[in-house]
Image: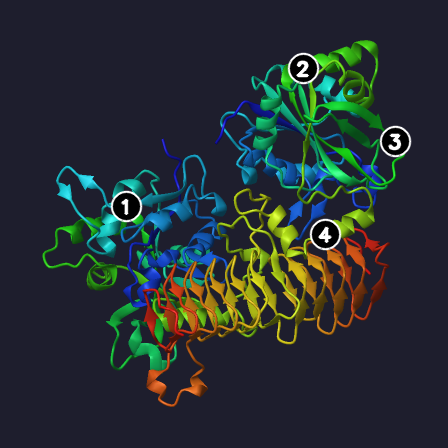
Amino acid sequence: MRGNNVMGIIFSNLHENLISQLTELRTMGAVPFGGRYRLIDFPLSNMVNSGINKIGVITKSNYQSLTDHLGAGKAWDLSRQRNGLFILPPFMDPADYANRVKTFNSIMPFLKNSSEEYVVISDCDVICNIDFQKVFEKHVENGADITLVYKRGQLPAKLQNPTVLSFDSKGKVIDVLVDPSINGSCSFYMNIMLIKRELLMELVNKCISKNTMSFKRDIIQGEYKNLNVYGYEFKGFAPVITSMSDYFNANMALKDGDVRSDLFRGDRPIYTKVRDDMPTKYGLGSKVSNSLIGNGCSIEGEVENCVLFKGVHIGKGTKVSNCVIMQDTKIGSNCSLSYVVVDKDVVIRDDKTLAGQPSYPVYISKLSVV
Amino acid sequence: MYPKQEVVAMLLAGGQGSRLGVLTQKLAKPAVPFGGKYRIIDFPLSNCVNSGIEAVGVLTQYQPLVLNEYIGSGQPWDLDSMNSGVRILSPYQQIKGTDWYKGTANAIYQNINYIDRYNPNYVVILSGDHIYKMDYSKMIAFHKENNADCTIAVIDVPLAEASRFGIMNTNPDGSIYEFEEKPEHPKSTNASMGIYVFSWDKLRKYLIEDETTEGSEHDFGKDVLPKMLEDGQRMFAYQFQGYWKDVGTIDSLWEANMDLLDPNVPLDLSDESWKIYSRNPVVPPQYIADGASVQNSLIADGCDIRGTIDFSVLFSNVVVKPGAVVQDSIIMPGCVIEEGAVVQYAIVSENTVIGKNAVIGARPEDIEDKDKWGIAVIGDTLNIGAGASVEPKAMISKDIEEVK
C-alpha cells in the first residue's frame, strides 16, 4: 500500500565519531555495507516497504558521497511527483544541527508543511529489516503518543547514551534510564521511534524555549510520565555499529544464511543504487568458500570467509580470508590478507601480506596504494 | 514541437525467434536472457546510447509483454528524456484498416509519422537478435563521407560459412554492386550484419513506393535494398571489426554465452567506456558456501551456490544445492538445482526446478552417436522430477515426473 499517513525522518550523520576511519570521507549513512549497500539503504528501504513515501534525510557535513548515492531517490522509488525524497542539509550553519533537538527545530518548516499525521524517526547505524506497518498498528492499538522500538540483549559496549527502558505488563514505558551501568540483558532503545508529527513539533518547541537540548533526557526521559509511551520489541537481526569491530562482525554475520534471509527478505527487499556491473567472473583455479560476493568482481585467487563488494579483483595466487573488501579495490598476485577491512578503490600490489586480529581488524583507507 | 534529431534508430524486435523453441514461447527473441544478467536487446539499446543516439523506436509484435515491461520508461539506458528516448511501437488500427507488420520494411513504413516528427537526416535500422558492441556514430560518419544513400554493415566471415549469410559484393571503393542471399558459391566473405544506415528522405521515398508494389514482401533484404541497388542509389558496405554473433539458434545462443568465459574472445562486458546497461534485479550479493567449487564461470547477484559449477553462466537468484553439478550450461534467473542433480551442456530457462539426482544433457565425449548430441533445453517454470533424465538435444516444455 502506498500513501499512508506516515512520513519518515532519517538521521544520516549521527555517531560518526565511533567509526571515524570509515566516516572520514563520508557520512554515516554512506558507509558501505554487505557487498553492495550503504547503511542508509536499510532505513530508507524499510520505510518505503512500509508504505511511507515522504522521507526527509538529515545530513550535516561530508555528504557528497551520500547525495551521489541517493540522487533523486529513484532506486527507492522516491523520485515522485508528490512527496518522495527530501535531502535536508543545514540551512546555513552546521551548528544548527549540533544535536537532535536543534536539528528538529531547524527543519520545523519541513515538518510544518507536511500533512502526514505521524513521523517515523530512524538513524543509520542500526542495520535491520523492520516492518513499520506493524509498529504503526501496535501504536494505534495502544493509543500511544510515542512508540519506541527496542531490542533485548547486552548493551553494545560503545553505544552512545544508551537508553534502557522498563515496561509494565502492557508494554507501557514505566522507567527510562539514560547511560546506566548495566550488566546482562536489558531492553535498549534502537533510536527508532514513531510519534505524532504535531506532538514532535510541540515537544521540540518546548525544549527550545527552555533551552534544554537533550532529546533523550529532556524529551524521552523528561516526558514519558506525561505521555503514553510504549515500546515495540524488534526481534530480528539488528546489529548496532559502534566500532570498527562491530562493523566487521556485522558484515561477517551475513555469511549466515538465516541472517541473510532475515535481512534480505523477498517481500521487503533492500533497495540500493545500482551500477551496471557484469556478473562476477570466477577464473580457472579460483577457490571461493563461505563468502558473500557482489557483482562485477573477478576472482583468480582464493577467497575464504569474506565479504567482497562489487568490482573487486583478486589476483592469482592471492589468498584473502576473513576480510571485508569494498568496491573496486584491486588486489594483485601472491598477496595474503586476513582480518583486513579494505575501503573503496584501494590498490594492493603483488606479494603483499596484511594481517589483523579477529578482535581488531586492520583498516586500509579509501584510495590508498599498498 | 519535437527537437530535431540527426539520427533516429529503429530496432526491429517483433520476431518470434522460433528456432529458439521453448525459450521464446512466452517472450520475443530480443527479451531472451543473456550473459548472466542481460537480455539480448540490452546490446543494441546500449550501443545506441553509447553512440549518442537519443531517439530509438522499438518495433514489437510477437509476445510483447515481457519486452515492454523490461524496456519500461527506458530509464536504465538513459532513454527516458522528455521529448526523445525509447518508444515502443506496436502495430495499430488505422482508418484504412488494421494490419500486422507485414515485413521489416512495412514495420518502418507504418511508423513513418514517428520518424518524421524528429525530422532526422539518417535512420539506423537495427535488429534485436545480435550480441555485439558497435559504435554506430562511426558508421554514420562513413555514410556521410561517402555521400551514401544506404550503408550496410558487413563482417568478414570464413568462406566456408559465407553461404549462410547475405553476401555483399563490393567495388574497391566500398560501394556495393551486388547482393547475394545465401549464395551457393559466394564471391566474397562480406556478410551483412542486418544493420543499415539510410538517408531518411531516400528511405522514406522507397518505403512509400514499396508499400504499393505488387508482390513485394515488404522486406528490406528481399525488396527495398535490391530496388535501391537496381535504381543505382549509392550503397556502401561498412566493414565492422570486432565481436558479433547472431544468437538466433540454440547453439549460437549457447556459444555466445560461453564466449563470455573465454578471455580470448573480444567481448569485454566490464569495459567502462562502452557499458552494456540493463535492468538490475533487487537482490543481495551472491553467496558461495563452504564446499562449493566454482571454476571459470559467471555468476550473478542473488545466487546461493553450494555445489560444483564449471564453465557455466548463472543468472540472478539461482540456487545450487550441495552435491549438484552444473557444467557448460546456462541457468536463467530463479532456477533451483537440487542435491545431486547433474546439468551438462544445457540451457535451463527461468524459475525451473531440477529435482534431486536428475540428469540433464550430457557431455559430447560421453555420447557415441554424435548426431544425437546437442544442447538440452528446459523451458521456464517447470518441475523436473527427482531422478528424471533429459537427453541431450531435447527440448522440454512440460513438467517431468519423478522417477523412483
Depth check, mark 2 against mark 1: the one in front is 2
Depth check, mark 1 against mark 3: the one in front is 3
Q: How many marks?
A: 4
- The disc, 4 or 2, on the residue closer to the chain's N-terminal end is 2
Residue A145 position, x and y percent, is: 66, 18
Judged from this view, the residue extending furthest toward the left is B214
Depth check, mark 1 against mark 4: the one in front is 4
Asked whether residue A233 appears in the rendered view, the answer is: yes
Disc 3 marks a residue whose amino acid type is: Pro
Judged from this view, the residue extending furthest toward the front is A169
Quarter of the picture holding the C terminus of chain A: bottom right
Tell me the residue that label 3 is attached to. Answer: A180
Name the subunit of mark 2.
Answer: A
* Up-down relation of residue A204 to residue A292 (above or below): above
Tell me the residue that label 4 is attached to. Answer: A251
* Up-down relation of residue A340 to residue A21 (above or below): below
Residue B156 position, x and y percent, is: 40, 74
Disc 4 marks a residue whose amino acid type is: Asn
* Up-down relation of residue A205 to residue A325 (above or below): above
Tell me the residue that label 2 is attached to. Answer: A199
Discs 4 and 2 share one subunit: yes
* Up-down relation of residue B72 to residue B273 (above or below): above
Discs 1 and 4 share one subunit: no
Out of A124 and B77, give the one closest to the viewer.
A124
Q: Residue at x 73, y 74 (%)?
A: A317
B227 with respect to A229 (left or right)? left
Name the subunit of mark 3.
Answer: A
Judged from this view, the residue extending furthest toward the top is A209
B317 with respect to B29 (left or right)? right
Tell me the residue that label 1 is attached to. Answer: B90
Q: Residue at x 54, y 25 (%)?
A: A83
